[in-house]
Amino acid sequence: MTELAMKAYEYYQLPGELVSLTGFGSGLINKTYKIIHRVNGNEVAYILQQINNQIFPDVEGLMNNIDKVTRFLKDEARERGGNPERETMTVELTKDGKLFAKTDDETYWRIYRFVDGTFCLNRVEEEAHFFEAARAFGDFAAKLHHFDARELVEVIPKFHDTRDRYRQFEEAVANDAAGRVKDLTEEIEFVRSRRDDCYYLYDLLDAGELPLRVTHNDTKLNNILLDEQTQKGICIVDLDTIMPGLVLFDFGDAIRFGANTAAEDEPDLTKVSFDLSLYEVYVKGYLEGSKGILTEREIALLPWGAKVITLEQGIRFLTDYLNGDVYYGTTRPHQNIDRTRVQFKLVKEMEVLWEEMNEVVQRFV
């Protein structure tokens, strides 16, 4: 694979001389490499990444989205005296001035400047880090408040359209491709009894009661770079799924991921619970970071964002299990139904704690 990466590297003309090009990180979607160059005696790092055009077929649209958003964020940083090179990603252009390279073997590549002196976390180790993640993603939403979301293309159409996810689920039940419907009566009924929940937020969007915003759509903890010295979140990364959407789902997906006490595929549901204290930490950080740009309706519906996105993810796992495990990678039998049940357990606990979840939001308004 390094040979392919070297071929892609040749499409660029970075300053200085190449010291090394090695594999980097553990991302599942894009293959990633770290480049070290020596410039005037100093080492400068870059990230070379192969873009998965199976998942993102519109590579040009994807990179144009990233270019528009990062340019906007850099301008915003300059205007307030910030550090544009450190606070947002920098895309390096190819020799012919393009945002990405398409090689002779039909693979697509890009290079970002590496942000030195930062680290990221894969799980919540301290409440302070979860707060900082919330503040950083809230700040990201605030900075893009005046960016017209309609300028961005939908790189994955209907990605978080829960109505469409429900439709796909019913289709999978009707087709019963893997012959598993008979064993999943409880899970199928769980989804059907919450059909209205799948429609609620998007119906409000269609009615003009919720604004369309620029959304990140993958607000996991490890998509924030934290400063090694200050421990503060300084840069949001992995902008591949940046699209028009509901900010409630950016908030909610972080809760789904971060306030779960167990692994996403934990087979023992007694280990799975919704951590209300971590939810409270995130609400506080997100509202502080978003600096008052959220509407009253958006703020009131933050618990709905957490519940609906968790339900959606469970539906996606269940749909894939019904279809015979064709989308999500598995390493053992029944892994997707275990994933489903974890999400549904979280939904149930949110429903039990619904009043408390709403009280938390009101406490920080």
Image (spheres, rainbow, N blue to C red):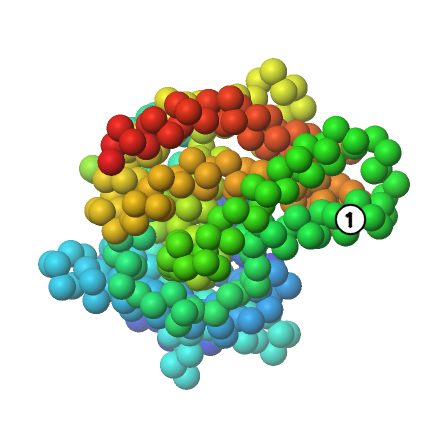
In screen coordinates, is 166 left or right of 229? right
* Residue 34 shows in this picture: no
Q: Nearer the viewer, residue 90 or 206?
A: 206
Q: Residue at x 62, y 74 (%)?
A: 106
**Circle 1 residue:** 172
Q: Nearer the viewer, residue 72 or 358?
A: 358
Q: Residue at x 31, y 52 (%)?
A: 141
Q: Is residue 253 above or below residue 167?
A: above
Residue type at mark 1 is Ala
Q: Is residue 272 above or below residue 223?
A: above
Res 354 → quadrant: top left
Name the residue at the bottom extreme.
96
Quadrant containing the N terminus in the rendered view: bottom right
In percent of width and height, residue 293 lies at 25, 51
Q: Is residue 253 above or below residue 89?
A: above
In screen coordinates, is 217 left or right of 293? right
Q: Residue at x 51, y 53 (%)?
A: 203
Res 302 → quadrant: top left
In screen coordinates, is 183 left or right of 263? right
Name the residue at the top extreme.
270
